Amino acid sequence: MRKELIVHQDPKSPISEIFRTLRTNIQFMNTKNKLKTILVTSTLPGEGKSWVSSNLAVTFAQAKKKVIIVDADMRKGRQYSIFDALPRPGLSNYLSGISVNEDAEASEDIANYIQQTEIDNLYLISAGNIPPNPSELLISPQMVDLLEQLKEMFDVVIIDGTPSQLVTDSLILTRLVDSTVIVTSSNETKKDDLKRIINNIENVGGKIAGIVVNKISMSSKKYEQSYYYGSKTTSKAKSTGKKSNKNGYNRASSMMGTRNASNSSPANKNSNKAPQNTKSNVNSTNKTTTRTKQSQEELPKALKKEKRPEKKEEISIEKTNDILNQINEYLDKEKKKLS
């Protein structure tokens, strides 16, 4: 299983919390239990469509829902690589009736195409062989029958579709599914392209659940202010000081910026040095406390030693006496001269 499944690899990370928020929003929309099939699409390739759909499926599975993810990108499907599953037989083999082996006939039983993943309650139908006519296969009655069967077998069906601006595969599926989620990329997706996709989905009769903005950079301050303040990354960032805070920022930004987020980040490597830093910090605090105690004890002695005002008064009296004596002598001389 690849490290792209952040919700499974690091369930206490802020990114996992965002996916749980997305799951909650979808569940609130499903008030009458009619929202079972969800299509995940994007405007262009590379916006994180497959990454979002796979992690969203994991969040539903963690909520004790029986979930299946269908890789409907029969041109360039990659869900099998994310879950370390078999690439075929898959969706194209079921819809076309062509088996992996050309000599044999494809099975009509949908159970032969469903693979169980390493995650509990989560199943997968891979894309299968690359067909010459993916759009025609999605229009076929077999696709409608497939979705009806999956609705009866599973609680949630998540479909990883194709980018909507390049091909019409996802636009076809928007009419068959209950709702659609559009994945966009921050500072990359153009507003005109997004508006065009929304209009196309609405024109064919599809429903849009919402838009997911991907690849948003997170600052280290926001990363540490996550709900799981006791998570690994946050505690390491606090224990290792400024250097680890910088690494925490890199880890958070890489998780949002790329789909291949890994747990082997510099923050994990620097965490081994954390106990030494904490010891030094404890020693430094002990030194400061002892110094403050010594300074408090020595403070009265210092005040007793420094009786400078009295000395200054003594010195000033002697000087005034000398001046007065000089004045008296001068006056006596002047009197003698006058007499």
Image (cartoon, grey):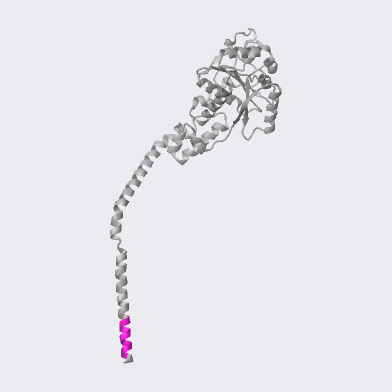
Is 333 magenta? The answer is: yes
- From the top left corner, tell me how far across and down residue 316 is, in percent: 32, 71
| Magenta highlight range | 327-336
| Residue sitting at x 59%, y 24% | 50
Residue 245 % position (x, y) = 48, 38
Q: Is residue 140 above or below residue 52?
A: above
Number of numbered callouts drawn: 0
Between 273 and 170, the one lying in front of the other is: 170
Percent across and percent down for residue 337 are 33, 91
In the image, residue 90 lies in the stretch drawn in magenta:
no
Answer above or below: position of 330 versus 137: below
Residue 217 occupies quadrant? top right
Work out which residue is located at the far top of the displayed protein and give it.
104
Tell which residue pokes out farthest to the front in this image.
Answer: 32
- The quarter in which the C terminus is drawn is bottom left
Observer-nearest residue: 92 or 70? 70
Is 127 positioned to the left or the right of 200 in the image?
left
- 173 with respect to 271 (left or right): right
Predominant secondary structure in magenta?
helix
Residue 236 x/y as whole percent: 44, 35
Using the image, determine if residue 335 lies above or below residue 285: below
Which residue is nearer to you in this view: 147 or 88? 147
In the displayed orientation, state which residue is furthest to the bottom: 339
Left or right: 286, with 71 as reference point? left
Residue in view at x 29 percent, y 66 percent: 310
